[in-house]
Every structure is written in C-alpha cells, then in structure tokens.
Image: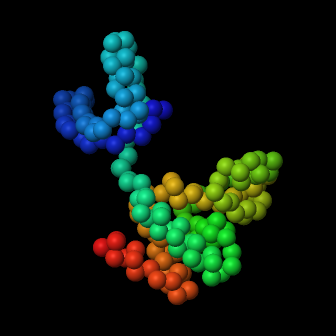
C-alpha cells in the first residue's frame, strides 16, 4: 500500500464497459509521488496486471486547535478531580471516543493492550469451538477526523462546564 492521498475527480469517460477516470492530486507528498512513480512504471511495463485502488470519502484530520483545547481542558479538570490528565483522557475516550471490538487468542491479550490507547476486556467468548477474549479497543484522538474529535471535545466541554471551568474561549474561536 502506498498510502492515503487526497484527490478530486477531474473527469469521467465511459465507452461500453471501459471507463477512464482522472483525478487531480494537489500538493506533493510522499504518497502522491510514490503513486505517480508506480503508475509510470506500470505504464512502461505494458503489463496487463491490474492495480488495486481503494477510493473512499476524504475526512479532514482533527485540528491542532481542537487538540490543544482538549488537553487544556483535561489539565484543568484533572486539577479539580485530583487525577492526571492522562487518566482523565482515557476516561473521556471511554465515554465519548471511537472504538472497535476484536476477538483475540487469550495469549495475545497483553500484546493487544500495548498497541491500543486503551482497551476494555469484555470477557471470554467461544468462536467456532475455540476460546477467545473479546476486547473493546479505543482509538487515540490523534487518529480522529474533525467530526470524531468534535464529539469527544463536546463531551469533555460538557463535563468541564459541570466542574465550573470556563469553556467560552473555545466557543468564541469555534464560531
């Protein structure tokens, strides 16, 4: 896999069962340059080998401002609650964050826990006659897009307000 590339559809042409779709890639990054080089090499080779393309709707990453405000609020909340901002972050991910469920072999549980931001053990399960452990794995906010980060931040803002923390600075910048 080369990577994720932001592109817009430039043109679409269909003739019978054949189609030509062209994309415009703005900016030059490693993934875009790698794709360009791979396409040039493929065209030169005259191979009939197909390429695998995955196309999905683009989602903007969370903003630096959102992240900074999240950690500012967590620090203020942690002071009031007498805990660490990192522990509070894990709690907020649990309440408002994005997660997935996976089933792993019992001996893999600890390795999986080291790879994810936070993991909740949901207990043993049996799948096709084999024992496994179902885990709820939370993505860290660095992987969030703006919509996911807004959901997390809205939850943290509501809890901060309940503690009497001023959150108007963010709302003024947000509008």
Tag count: 0
In the image: residue 161, left or right of residue 90? left
At horizontal 19% and vertical 33% (from top left) the residue drawn is 14
Q: State which quadrant residue 21 falls in.
A: top left
72 vs 63, nearest the viewer: 72
Q: Toward which corner of the image does residue 171 lie, by quadrant? A: bottom left
Q: Residue at x 69, y 75 (%)?
A: 83
* Residue 127 seen from this side: no
Residue 108: horizontal and vertical position, in percent?
76, 47
* Nearest to the observer: residue 52 or residue 79: 79
Q: Is residue 146 above or below residue 47?
A: below
Q: Is residue 7 above or below residue 36?
A: below
Which residue is most to the top?
Answer: 45
Residue 115 x %, y %: 67, 49
Estimate the x, y position of residue 24 in percent, counting from the top left. 25, 37
Report whether residue 4 is seen: yes
Q: How is the image coloured?
A: rainbow
Work out which quarter of the rendered image holds the C terminus and state it.
bottom left
151 vs 6, left or right, is right
The residue that appears at 34% across and 76% down in the rendered structure is 172
Coordinates of residue 119 in the picture (x, y in percent)? 68, 60
User: Which residue is found at the position 74% from the left and 48% from the top?
Assistant: 111
């Amino acid at each position: 896999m080369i990577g994720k590339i932001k592109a817009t559809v430039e043109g679409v042409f269909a003739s019978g069962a054949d189609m030509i779709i062209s994309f415009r890639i703005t900016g030059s990054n490693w993934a875009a340059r790698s794709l360009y080089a791979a396409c040039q090499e493929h065209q030169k080779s005259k191979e009939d080998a197909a390429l695998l393309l995955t196309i999905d709707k683009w989602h903007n990453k969370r903003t630096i401002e959102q992240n900074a405000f999240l950690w500012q609020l967590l620090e203020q909340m942690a002071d009031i609650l007498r805990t660490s901002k990192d522990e509070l972050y894990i709690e907020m991910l649990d309440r408002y964050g994005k997660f997935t469920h996976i089933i792993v072999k019992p001996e893999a549980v600890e390795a999986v826990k080291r790879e994810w931001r936070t993991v909740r053990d949901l207990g043993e399960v049996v799948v096709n006659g084999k024992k496994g452990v179902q885990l709820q794995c939370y993505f860290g906010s660095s992987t969030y897009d703006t919509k996911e980060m807004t959901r997390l931040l809205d939850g943290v803002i509501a809890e901060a307000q309940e503690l009497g923390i001023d959150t108007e600075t963010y709302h003024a910048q947000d509008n």
